[in-house]
Image: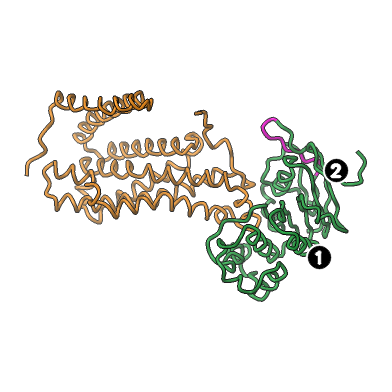
């Protein structure tokens, strides 16, 4: 995926305008941070991008193709969404990391144990973590394992919904570095953590349903 | 052996008067259940009386077409009750769930040919009660499964989204929810099978013994019906969730709100 664009996106829920006329052009490798007060529609925006929120108006276009019910699967196969709370899962960390590679579309792309370990180590884990029960990990640890799992999918576009909210300072930095370190990786992160406001980040504010790039005139 | 001694209607009426005891208890405890209690028992008396009349005719007629129609009607009522109690719209789901339940009903009834000869099985006196036993017993498992499945998908939609965004197809993404729903529905069913005879004497067996059958015959029938009930419960649980979920999500994998009954109860 090279470009992806939101054109005049509006989301209306229970007679309330959550998102109004959202326009955003994202090029390959862009790192975008969306900030805004709680309830401003940041999560709704990510869900709308992925087609999980009904848009009353507007379209999502990627590489010139309008996302519709017939093209949504192709589009989603290039994205990875990580929510703020990790999945519930019974099994070891290694089994959990392998979970998406059991899906038909990812079969044959399963990473080797060395690759898995390398990424987990970058996220501050020791090798013993692979055999640990996923459920026995703390919320923050589960979140980091989920991030490792998402990175191993090697998708083009990462949609991150408050992924660092349950992490300590050192881990927040680790996670941000992993996502922003690669020039090819396109990232749209919704976060309250100020650590995301680094160099090269395009920062947007979402307020009263309107999305505005920092520095842009009102 | 003799057939069961018939109960006179006046004495049955007197027996019903015993219900005054729980009614007084409800009133004393201020449970506000007496209205429901009266409605439930009046409905039961009317329904069973009607069934008694219908069954008399159906048993007398004993033709395959009428038997099949009766079973289709039974499945329809079971289907409607399952959907209503699970909070799903009958109008929208009926088209997909009814054929599935009906097909399953005939497959399971057909499987009785392994143990009964065709002449016996297809006679109304066997076919109708067996179908009734089976469909009366799958309501709870199906309601639990559908209710659990849709409440979890709605509550943990972030998880569903995560699976889909990892590349899961619809069938792959609903699998964890399906697994949980089946576990919740069938776990208690397995427990009730394992305590059968210890905690309660099953209804069919008791009925047959009272009707004059030997306990040995009654038990073989009970064993057969337990296998059939479990088979139907487990298959219908799985099928109802899978089949209904195909209609419950739109082309984007979003759950369609209009497929659910709005809860107007406070």
Q: Secondary structure at mark 1?
A: loop
Give the chain of mark 2: A
Residue for point 83% across, 64% down:
A183
**Chain letter for the orange part:** B
The residue where tag 1 is placed is A181
A68 up-or-down from B6: above or below:
below
Q: Is residue B59 left or right of residue B26?
A: left
Residue B39 visible in the displayed image: no
Q: Position of residue B226 (x, y in %)?
A: 28, 51
Helix, strand or loop at label 2? It is strand
Q: Which color was chain A given?
A: green
Q: Is residue A123 magenta?
A: no
What is the chain identity of the residue bearing mark 1?
A
Magenta-colored span:
A7-15
Q: Position of residue A153 (x, y in %)?
A: 68, 64
Foreground residue among B51 and A177: A177
The residue nearer to you, when weighing B240 against A213, is A213
Dot 2 crowding, Cα within 10 Å, few <14, some 14–19, many 20+: some
Picture quarter with the N terminus of chain B = top left
Residue A203 in sight in this render: yes
Q: Is the residue marked by circle 1 packed among few (<14), some (14-19), or many (20+) residues within 10 Å?
A: few
- Residue at the disc numbered 2: A212
Give the residue furthest to the left: B1
Looking at the picture, the colour scheme in use is: by chain
Res B168 → quadrant = bottom right
- Mark 1 vs mark 2: which is more N-terminal? 1
Image coords of residue B198 (percent x, y) = 23, 52
- Against B152, is A113 above or below? below
Give the main secondary structure, helix, strand or loop, of the magenta stretch.
strand
Q: Residue furthest front?
A: B28
Circles 1 and 2: CB distance less than 8 Å?
A: no
Task: Locate residue B176 relative to residue B72 in the image: left or right.
Answer: right
């Amino acid at each position: 995926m090279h470009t992806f664009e939101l054109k005049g996106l509006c989301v209306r829920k229970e007679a309330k305008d959550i998102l109004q006329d959202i326009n955003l052009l994202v090029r390959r490798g862009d790192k975008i941070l969306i900030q805004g007060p709680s309830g401003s529609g940041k999560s709704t925006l990510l869900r709308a991008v992925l087609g999980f929120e009904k848009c009353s108006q507007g379209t999502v276009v990627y590489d010139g193709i309008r996302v519709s019910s017939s093209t949504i699967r192709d589009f989603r196969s290039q994205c990875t969404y990580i929510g703020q709370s990790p999945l519930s899962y019974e099994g070891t960390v290694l089994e959990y990391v392998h979970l998406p590679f059991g899906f038909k579309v990812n079969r044959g792309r399963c990473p080797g144990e060395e690759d898995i370990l390398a990424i987990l180590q970058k996220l501050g884990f020791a090798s013993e973590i692979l055999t640990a029960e996923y459920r026995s990990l703390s919320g923050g640890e589960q979140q980091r394992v989920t991030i490792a799992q998402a990175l191993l999918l090697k998708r083009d576009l990462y949609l991150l919904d408050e992924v660092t909210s349950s992490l300590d300072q050192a881990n927040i930095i680790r996670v941000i570095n992993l996502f922003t370190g690669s020039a090819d990786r396109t990232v749209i992160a919704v976060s309250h953590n100020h650590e995301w406001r680094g160099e090269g980040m395009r920062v947007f504010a979402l307020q009263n349903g309107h999305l505005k790039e920092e520095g842009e005139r009102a | 052996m003799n057939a069961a001694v018939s109960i006179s209607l006046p004495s049955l009426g007197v027996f019903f008067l015993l219900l005054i005891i729980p009614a007084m208890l409800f009133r004393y405890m201020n449970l506000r259940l007496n209205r429901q209690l009266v409605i439930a028992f009046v409905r039961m008396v009317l329904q069973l009386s009607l069934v008694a009349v219908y069954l008399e005719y159906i048993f007398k007629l004993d033709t395959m077409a009428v038997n099949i129609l009766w079973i289709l009607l039974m499945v329809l009522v079971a289907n409607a009750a399952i959907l209503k109690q699970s909070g799903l719209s009958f109008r929208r789901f009926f088209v997909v769930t009814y054929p599935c339940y009906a097909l399953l009903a005939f497959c399971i009834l057909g499987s009785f040919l392994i143990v009964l000869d065709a002449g016996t099985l297809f006679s109304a006196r066997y076919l109708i009660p067996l179908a009734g036993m089976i469909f009366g017993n799958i309501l709870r498992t199906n309601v639990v499964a559908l209710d659990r499945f849709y409440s979890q998908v709605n509550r943990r939609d972030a998880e569903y989204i995560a699976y889909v965004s990892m590349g899961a197809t619809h069938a792959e993404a609903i699998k964890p929810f399906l697994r949980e729903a089946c576990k919740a529905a069938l776990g208690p069913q397995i427990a009730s099978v394992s305590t059968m005879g210890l905690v309660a004497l099953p209804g069919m067996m008791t009925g047959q013994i009272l009707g004059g059958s030997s306990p040995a015959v009654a038990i073989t029938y009970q064993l057969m019906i337990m296998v059939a009930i479990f088979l139907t419960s487990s298959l219908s649980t799985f099928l109802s969730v899978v089949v209904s979920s195909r209609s419950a999500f739109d082309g984007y994998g979003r759950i369609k709100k209009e497929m659910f009954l709005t809860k107007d109860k406070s």
